[in-house]
Image (spheres, helix red, strand yellow):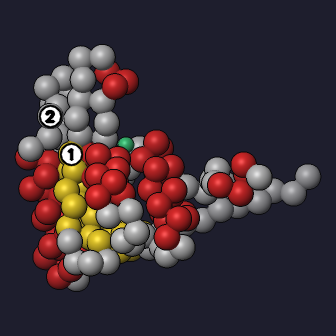
Amino acid sequence: MIKKFLTIEFEEWENENTLPEADAILLNKAHEAAQKAYAPYSRFKVGAALLLENGEIIQGNNQENSSYPVGSCAERTALFYASARYPDIKIKAIAITADTHEPIPPCGMCRQAMLEYETKQQNCIPVIMGGKTGKIWKINSVSSLLPLQFDPHHLK
Ligand SMILES: [Zn+2]
C-alpha cells in the first residue's frame, strides 16, 4: 500500500478591493445575479457570472422548486445557458457568491458540471469565490476543485 496525498493551491485575497479589476467586475456581476435568485425555500441566494471569450458575461442564480431536487444552482443555471447560447465560445472565468461573510465554494454537482466544460474547451477555467464581505478565494482550474475526478475518458 502506498499513501498518496493531494494538495490544492489557491489564492486568498483580503477583500474585493484588492482583487485584479477583471475578477472584481465578474464577482460584482455574480453579486448582481444573486439578488435576482429564486430562493423562496432556503432564502439562500447564490449568484454566478461567467466571462466568455467573446467578452460577454453570463449571469445565473439559484432556481428553487417546491419539489426540492428539481431546482438548480446558480453555477449550473449560468453554465447551461452559456452552453446553449454559445456552444463554441470558451469560458474564461467563473465567479460565485452569496450573502455570506466567507467565500462560497461550488457544490459537488456544480464542480462536476464545470469540469465538463473545462474538459471540453481544453482550457482551465479559473473560479473566483467570494461572499458579501470578507476574503476572496481564486483557484486557477476547476480540475483542482475536483480531485480524482470522473471525466469522459472513464466512459471509454
Ligand atoms: Zn451547485
Q: Is residue 49 above or below residue 43?
A: below
For image coordinates 47% across by 61% down, the residue present is 117
Q: Earlier in the sequence, mark 2 or mark 1?
A: 2
In the image shown, does 75 or 7 lie closer to the viewer?
Answer: 75
Q: Position of residue 81 (x, y in %)?
A: 29, 52
- Seen as rendered, the residue at the extreme right is 1
Q: Dividing the image into four equal quarters, which quarter contains ligand 1?
A: top left
In the image shown, does 44 or 39 lie closer to the viewer?
Answer: 39
Quadrant of residue 38 within the rendered picture: top left
C-alpha gap between disc 2 and disc 1: 7 Å
Badge 2 crowding class, 10 Å Cα cut-off, few under 14, some 14 to 19, many 20 or more, is many
Q: Position of residue 7 (x, y in %)?
A: 60, 65
Amino acid type at circle 2 is: Tyr
Q: Is residue 16 above or below residue 84?
A: below
From the Cβ of disc 1, is ligand 1 less than 8 Å away? no
Q: Is residue 152 above or below residue 53?
A: above
Q: Position of residue 66 (x, y in %)?
A: 24, 17
To which residue does mark 2 refer? 38
Amino acid type at circle 1 is: Asn
To which residue does mark 1 refer? 61
From the Cβ of disc 2, is ligand 1 less than 8 Å away? no
Q: Does residue 14 appear in this view?
A: no
For image coordinates 46% across by 50% down, the residue present is 113
Dot 1 falls on a residue whose secondary structure is strand
